[in-house]
Every structure is written in structure tokens, then in C-alpha cells.
Amino acid sequence: MTDEPSPTSDPPDEQDYRELIRESNLVLRTGNLMLGAGTSSLRVRTAMLRVSRALGIEHMQATISFTNIVVTTHQRTLFRTLVGEVTTPGVNADRIRAIQKFARGLPARADATDVTAQLDRIEARPPVHPAWMVTLAVGLACISVGFLGGGGWRELLAVFVAAMASYSLHRQLLARKLNLFGSVVLSTLTASLVYLAVSWFSHGMVLESTPRMVAGFIAASIFLVPGFPLFTGSLDLARLDLQAGIGRLTYAALVMLSIGIGAWVVASVAGLVPTPPPPVVLDPVWLWTLRVLASFGAVFGWAIMFNSPWPEAVWSGMIAIVGSMVRLLLLEAGTLEHVATFVGALVMGVLCHAVGRWFGLTRLIMLVPVMLVMIPGSPALQALLHFNSGDLFSALGSGIFVVLQVIAMVCGLVASMMVLDPAWAFTRRDSAILKR
């Protein structure tokens, strides 16, 4: 059952039309800002509902996809339908946090002028972190993934340089509005070529395809893996928001394909053969210490890349340590990979919910970075490289591993949301969602 616009005997006048037009535009603008920041359709709809109720709109209906919003607002006997479009999908965790805080803090009756001013301030907010810091954070995240994937110190040095060079180029290409998939291909080519050049130099002007070399080659472009659309799309599907969920997952798949194309080209020329690297041989105390640091570094770096505020970025890294260690300990005990991943994702989801409630942080912008420490980006790229080399059996094995890992991660995340968030566990009326 949904709220219906209440009929009235008083005919609307021209001022009523003007007010509805202005208020409807503000509702759509709120949705566009949230959708463009990369959040799930549930959060987009909830923010729009809060704004519409505060502006006195009696009823609002919205259809939300990955790049479009169609919203209809009702006021007495009047209604208005608007269409919004997001031309360049992106991720801006600080904007998600700001709009959620703004929408939850609205009074029972808000003035349209005040709402406009607040949205103007949110849209004009500069990035939380300077570009040089984000570039360093991306390098930190990639070398952390490289270590967890079995890379040696020479490979990690090459990963650090290549990831920063590639990310800097990627920012410039997106700023110039180059086609997104073309930007991903060029950025992957840059990461791969710079990685091989630095590796060649650090190995004494010799370049040889070794398992550790391939591990670093994959880690150099791992920052391009579309983690936010992958997880928010999965959350949309869990709530049967099929239009938004399928769109996000299709976008994620196309980005992964673009990364694969760039990696294919360089791997073919360099003759790289994807093989699993041998275990890192270190004293157990040092090994686990470095694993802890790498888990924190990977997630903290991604959080900074997503423009997360400092508290969320630091807590994301701390939560990732716990979830990652739980997963690694289960693997050491002989647990199946996907089972260990499910448990790790469940632990991370529960901790994000608890920390967000205790410290007043935004849960969603912590959830995605912490999950990325377990995302099977390296096996996915390995599957593409196996296809490129004609090893279809190995490619199929890597592909099945990736699918099981992703399903386990999503199931663990959704399970934590359904246990701790009634909006995910039940199909709620709009009025019930807004009371949360």
C-alpha cells in the first residue's frame, strides 16, 4: 500500500504550479547528486523521499536506474514528472555522506530556498584530499594488493611507480571527458608498460616472465577494478531493484573487459604467462605483521581514492584488518576459499554497521572499501590472460574461482545488511523507511 495524493476541492492556482515545479526540481537534483556519487538506488530513493516530505510534497514516485531517474511528484490535484541523467558515473563518498546528513537533518517543513542553498554548498564542496595525496594512496593500495598476491620487493617497487603514473593519467583523461572505457584501456596500457619498464630496470636490465612478475603486473592496474558499482549493484539486486542492479553490474563487467583488453595487449608483447606465485617465505611474526599492514593499506588507499573523509577512511582500514585476518586464518585452517570469504565479508559488514552507529559514521562508504581487500581482481585478470594465451582450462578454473568469490562476498555483505538493517530485511513502505 502506498500513500496517495489527497484530493481537494480548492482548484490549484498559478502559484501552486510554480511551487511544485521548484520543489520537484529540488527532489530530482538531490537524486542526481546521490546517483552521480555512486550510491545504491535505496539510498538515492530515501534521500529524495526525505527532501520531498520536508518540502511538503504529498506523494513521490521514482524509478532509478544506473544513470537515470524518472520521478513524479504529486501535490493536491497537480503532478509533475521529471527525468534526470548522470552522463559520467563516478564515486564520491564525501558527497554521499553530506547528502545523507543533510536529508536526515531536514525539519518537518523546509523552505525551498534553504534547501537550494544547502544543495549548492554540497555540490560545490572541493575534494577532501589533494590530488598528490590521492595518487600516493592509490600507489599504497596497489602495492598492498601486490604483497597479498605474492609479489616481491622489486615487483612492489614497480607496482608503486606504475600505479601512480597510471592513476595520474586516468584522472587527466576523465577530466577531459574522454570515453570512460577508452580511458580505462589507456590507463591499463600505461600501468602495464610502466610496470614492465621499472621491473626491467630493477632486475638488472633483464625481463623474465616469473610468477612474482605476473602478480605485480596484475596489481599495477588493480585500482581500476570497479568495486563500488559491483557492490552497490549487488545490493540493488538483493532488494529486487533489477533495473539499477543489472545496469551497475553490466557497467562493472564492461570496465573489467576494458582492463583485460589493455592487459592482453601488453602481456602478449611481453610474453607473460600467468602462473600462481610461490608463498612468501618470512618469519611468521613478520609475515602476519605485513599482512595486517597490507590489509590496512589497501583499504585505506581505496577509501582515500573514493574521497572518503578521514574518519571513515581510517575505520575502514581497521575493520579490514579484522575481516581479512579472519579470512586468512580460516584459509590457514584449510577452509574452502569461498566459505572463508563469506565469513570475512559477514564480519566486515557487522563491524561497519557497529562502528557507523557508535561513532556516527556513514556505513555505506565504509562497506565498499573494506570489501575490496577480498575482491578477486587478480584471479579475474589471470583468467583473461589465460584466455589470451590459449589455456582455456586454466581460464575456466580461474573464472569459476572468481564467480564463487564474488558470490561469497556479496552473500556475506547482504547477510550482514539483512541481519542489522530492517530496510534490507523487509520490503517496507516509504513512511516506514523514513522513520529509521
Image: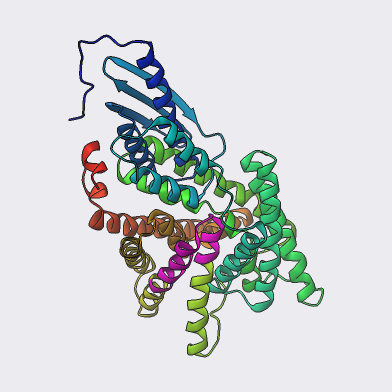
Which percent across, then down, holds residue 45? Answer: 35, 37
* Residue 102 percent across, percent down from the top left: 40, 45
48, above or below 281, in the image: above
| Residue 33 located left or right of residue 61 | right
Could you tell me residue 324's position as x and y percent? 42, 71
Q: Position of residue 203 (x, y in %)?
A: 76, 76
Magenta stretch encompasses residue 432: no
Tell which of 168 and 124 is nearer to you.
124
Identify which residue is drawn at 61% across, 62% down: 138
Q: Residue 341 or 142: which is nearer the viewer?
A: 142
Q: Quadrant of residue 90?
A: top right
Direction from residue 306 to residue 424 in the image, left or right: left
The question of residue 312 being in magenta is answered with yes
Residue 321 versus residue 125 in the image, above or below = below
Question: Can you see residue 277?
Answer: yes
At a point 29% along the width and 20% down the height, the residue shown is 75
Magenta residue span = 299-322
Q: Work out which residue is located at the far right of the displayed protein and give it.
A: 205
Depth check: 173 or 191 in front? 173
